[in-house]
Amino acid sequence: MSAPRLGENPFAVLDLTSDATRTETERAAQKLLAMLAVGHGSVASYATPLGPRPRTEALVRTAVAALRDPDQRLLAELAWTPPAEAQGATAAAWAPYADVLARRRPCFP
Amino acid sequence: MDPTVTVGIDLGTTNSTAAWFDGVSVSLVRSRSGSTLTPSVVRIDARGNVTVGERARRFLDSDPENTRAEFKRLMGTDQQLAFAAARATKRPQELAAEVLRALREDLTTQLGFAPEQAVISVPALFELPQIAATGEAARLAGFTRIEVIQEPVASAIAAGWTADGPASTWLVYDLGGGTFDASLMETSEGLLRVVGHDGDNFLGGRDFDAAIVTWVLERLRAQGVKVDRADPAHATALRRLRWAAEEAKIDLSQRSSTGISLPALFTVDGEAVDVDEELDVPTLEALVAPLVDRSIAVCQRLLARHGLRPDDLDHVVLIGGPTAMPMLRERVKSGVSARFATSVDPMTAVAQGAALFAATAGLSARPPAAPATGAPTGPRVWLQHPAVTADEAPFLVGRVLDPAGVSAVRAARADGSWTSAAEALDAEHTFALALSLRPRQVNDFHLFAVGPEGKERPFSPPSLRVVHGLSVGDPPLARSVGVALANDGVQLFVERGAPLPMRRTFTLRTVAAAGPNSGDALRVPIVQGEFALAHLCRLVGTLVIEGSRLSAPLPAGSAVEITLELDRGGRLSAHGLIPSLNQTFAHVEQLVVPQLSLDAAEKALAELASRLGPLQISAFRDGDQVAVARLGLANARLAEALSDLGAARGGDADAGEKSRRTVVDVDAELAEIESARAWPDAVAKAETELAWSAGWVAGHGEPTERKLFSAYIERIRQFIQSRKPTELAREVENAKRFGRAAYLRDPGAVAWSIDWYASRVSECRDPAAAAQAARAGRAALERGDHDSARRALSTLVQLAPPDAEERRLGHDSGVR
Amino acid sequence: MLPVAGLIPLLLIAARVAGSTNKGSGRGVAASALRGGAAAPTLDGWVALVNGAARFGLCIGFQSTLVLAIAGDVTWIGVGAGLVLGAFSFPTPASELAVRLGLPRVASYFTRVSAPWWTGRDPAGWAAVQAARALRFQRRPPSPGVLDFFADTAAFHRPTMSAQTLLARGLTEAGLGNPASARASLHALLRLKPMVERRRPFAIASAWLVADAGQRADWNELVRLCRDNPGRAGDLDVLGELVASSQGLAVDHSRLSRWGVLRRPRACRWWKQAAAARARPAPVELPPPPQSGDPIADAVATHAWLLRLGPSRVTRPALSLHSARWRVAADLGRATVGRRVAALGSRRSPEEVLGSLADGFRDDLLELLRAATLPGGTPFPEGSPAEEARVRLSHERADAFLAQSLAFHKSGNLPNPRRDAWVVLGQTLVAWEAFAACAAEAERPGVLEEGGRNLINGAADLCNRWREAMLGQLVFDWLSEAFPANGVGGELLELALRNAGLTR
């Protein structure tokens, strides 16, 4: 069993901090699953240190199951870090040149 | 308001039960004859009329050609069961559908409406093809949607619901007619969580009956009458004998001795043979003791795997008819734990638990209500909330479908003691409202739509019900699911214990080219099991990508993205996406338990027996108690499988299935024992090789090499500690490269190597050239010309015999 | 007018004579007909005969038509005939016209009958290139049968594949919409540099690969290709440095000063457009997180920072910082972990938990390193997740390389080996470069030895069964460069060659 990946930390998926109690976890999971089923827009993505990621029902279920298991919860706590502002994409720096380079027809000499 | 009614069905090997839960209590459905149990027996007569249950069971003895029972074990296979008079063949799932249909009719009588959705229980170790077959049976019976629940979860829910205590650990011991399941559960803070499963798909009350039959046949043989189980002429008689044995077994739970009396049962050599034996409790106990011990061993294995001792268990729940046997209870008490939970009815607990689970899953059995005509109702709203929860402040989430004139939502508890603040709707007309529940009670709430000036009207539906009780964690997957690779490895997709539903995607690469003109198909085999070798896992389906459906040729090494998806009941769907062609394939063939022919099974059993012998001898010599015990058990199972094979030849399809499964199980067991015994040897070998390499690297290695080598040593130590044989072998190979490089720098080494290779000249690909190179090398050494000697050595290395061919055991996999 | 027109055929003949004495194409097309040797004359022979003998007549014919048209008797039939004859007389421009019109077979034919100074040693190959270029100008998607057309073209020819045919193969794949195989073929081509004398195929191949890398936003790859620049195209030099500067990589100013750009006005377009979009934001600097008191939280924050950098901005110093902070966490964090283990009732030891955390880091870093192109070099500190990830990656890539080399060994069994073995070779060489980029020095010789053996055996097989001598030669050349560079003894190569029955 290895620690959860940085973009899929259960606490991040459920929008909790690492000191959440069992009741808070279950309540958050139930609320998120219901809101996803109804199509509430505000829960469509969650914040991670690597930027916002889409939230799906499967992710929420996996997250709450992980937090119920004491071993996995410990790893999730250790591996949790607060999501920071996502830094600008590197590709944006080269965006003005992108369409120059992206021309499908290379310049044959 | 019509209360939500949820339905749960226990589809058992011998008996089936249905129950319903109306939010307050669980009730069992009674069949027309008034019993809560419906035997899983189906009869089809000459006119095609189908009879199910108690009435069909009466014909089991007299009309065995047209009456079938105990087809649950055959679900998921493509075995056809023949009904002679009706001249029809049915698959096991069609017979199960008949049973479900009968139960559904009984439910309709008692509920007043035909249930649309239900929860059906399956054994925890049911494999994916069998779960799929259950779903198909339900569909055939007329259910629009079902969820599948594992039987131990259902029984624990039934037992946990009535209990009301602190955090505790439970073991559910479920010995049914055909299958045995052991499950470890934990309830804490109102949450029921399945920690682990184990069991045996071929151990049940039926095997007790088979043991009695074997005993009777042995008594007959002692009297000089030989009855061959493999003889098809005796099939009917054997079946009658089995039913008699079952009745005798049930009798003996209340009496101390009973008789099995069947006059003129067999006809051997033209003579009629009577069966008239007296069976008493001690004999029965001696007969079934090995089977019960097997079940206890499974329980102990489960506990050990999760680091628990039997004392750590708070409750043991016994489920299933055979657990009424006092001897069995004694054994469980001594082998596992003494604290039986008594508030559970062993025969009906599963159905009750399934109905309770249906409530937590929100599966209302009522058909969707017709749109109300007449009096105008309020704005429609679509609600999502748990029907049963342990949380005292759950959320009510919903979307208002007629948002005109509605700006906020308010909820009030029906008894008037609590009301919420008005929660405003967001841009998409959805809201999330926190409710407050009274503990351990049914809570009804009224919902109001708040207009712009504060005017309130009721919604439609105007109220909802939430029950405060137990929450159930998602059931975990019983056996890991993965894809077999071409090198007999397994790419694990979903590991055992992962919560369902679950979906995973991995990118694999093809090993051979495929294309529209090649005519080959790309096969991605899906396997279930805990082993790292694909051939030891069970094949449950193959995703086939036909070459003719590819839009362009696909070269070897192209990426294929495989997605496996398991729903809450463990039903599998798979699809593959080829990104370079942008095509998706979802054709999974062979979702059916694969069949070994009886002859192949017999050959396999013989081969296993021949492997078993030497293993037993060497384990005994080394004093390895654990291995000796396991091998003894395996030996017993092999003997059983042989007799089952005989019975299969006589027409008993179920015994045939069981013997095939035993073959695979014992193969896996032997492989495990072999690798476990091989482990110390592998470690010793690795350490010797490492020591050899280390010596040379220390003597002749470059500084960078030495540093890297020490890192390898560290890694190898870790692999030894964590018992990873493949990684260990590979790291040792890498380390040996360093050793070899350093070794070759030593002048003396060249001489020794030439001698070593020279002694193996005959094995080389080109013996003449090898011999010549050896001579040249020796001559060069005598001259003192080290460079030529080294060159000659390189020639010898090049000509050394190649490695053995790979065993193509990966089920013909086309991916790596 | 007439005397001037009469000079035209004389000039053409003179050009033919001059072309036929050109070194390298000295054998000429006619000689290739003789070398064809076998009982029936090959297509080349016929082409040579028609080419030589009829060209003169066609020129006269064209000239006469021209004269007639100018003299006044203009009919549409005459003009049409004149154009056709003109095309036959000047096949080089005719082929270019066919390319622009998107007619592969027509372009291919005209190229074959063109003058040798243009087509080079391998007119059939160059014909294939022209046909491939024509594919790009077609309006409708090309049919897969086109690929077989090229295979047949190559099959007539002995020795078989050449740089031009490989280029044609790559461009055809690109035209058919298989960028991955196109990439593999063109990469294989770029490695043929020592063998082939013309720069043009390399210029075209690198231009395509650069455009492809740009389209995939794989900037590291783009810069690498521009810096390799085997076709010595000036515009790629400038482009590479522009991209490097925007990515924050070191800029090689000597390349920028190659004003070859100005000599190639069409290529200047790229440069000009790139320079015109001057208002680009500087790449955002991302400093590592500061150290707080909690070593484990520090390590996790550093890990998050590293992943935020992404594969295009990760550097060796960043990974070393990650390893250092991990070391600190592993040493000092045990107490914190022990407390939490007890509180949660877990049954694992603190070492196990820290090990699982390290495994999680290792998996993340593995994914990062897979996508990044770090310069190879010294390994990372022992035991750190970065080093574990690097080792796993190098094992993965070693496996991939060995599997590819094995596939090359077996490529003689493919349905059309002379066409497809090149792609497999290209993939193998790409796989080797990927492995060498992440493997430590000491790990390379063993893997290269094993892979090299497969490559030699494969080349031997192709030589003996399919008479692909050029492929064998290429494999040998590549290995004789790669073996000493990676610490594998040279005598091994000699022995392997002798075993496989090849000679230098």
Image (cartoon, rainbow, N blue to C red):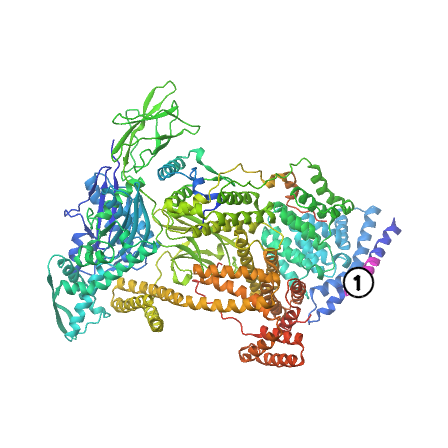
The answer to whether B216 appears left or right of B505 in the picture is left
x, y percent for residue B439: 27, 34
The answer to whether A61 appears left or right of B179 in the picture is right
Q: Is residue B679 above or below residue C108?
A: below
**Around disc 1, counting alpha carbons within 10 Å, would you say few (fewer than 14), some (14 to 19), or many (20 or more)?**
few
Q: Chain of mark 1?
A: C
| Amino acid identity at mark 1 | Lys
Question: C145 or B59, which lies in front?
Answer: B59
Question: B812 or C489, which lies in front?
Answer: C489
- Identify the residue position indicated by label 1 in the image: C23
Q: Is residue C346 visible?
A: yes
x, y percent for residue C258: 77, 47
Q: Is residue B140 visible?
A: no
User: Residues in magenta?
Assistant: C13-27
The picture quadrant where one finds residue B290 is bottom left
Question: C81 or B276, which lies in front?
Answer: B276
Q: Secondary structure at mark 1?
A: loop
Residue B750 among magenta residues: no
Q: How many marks?
A: 1
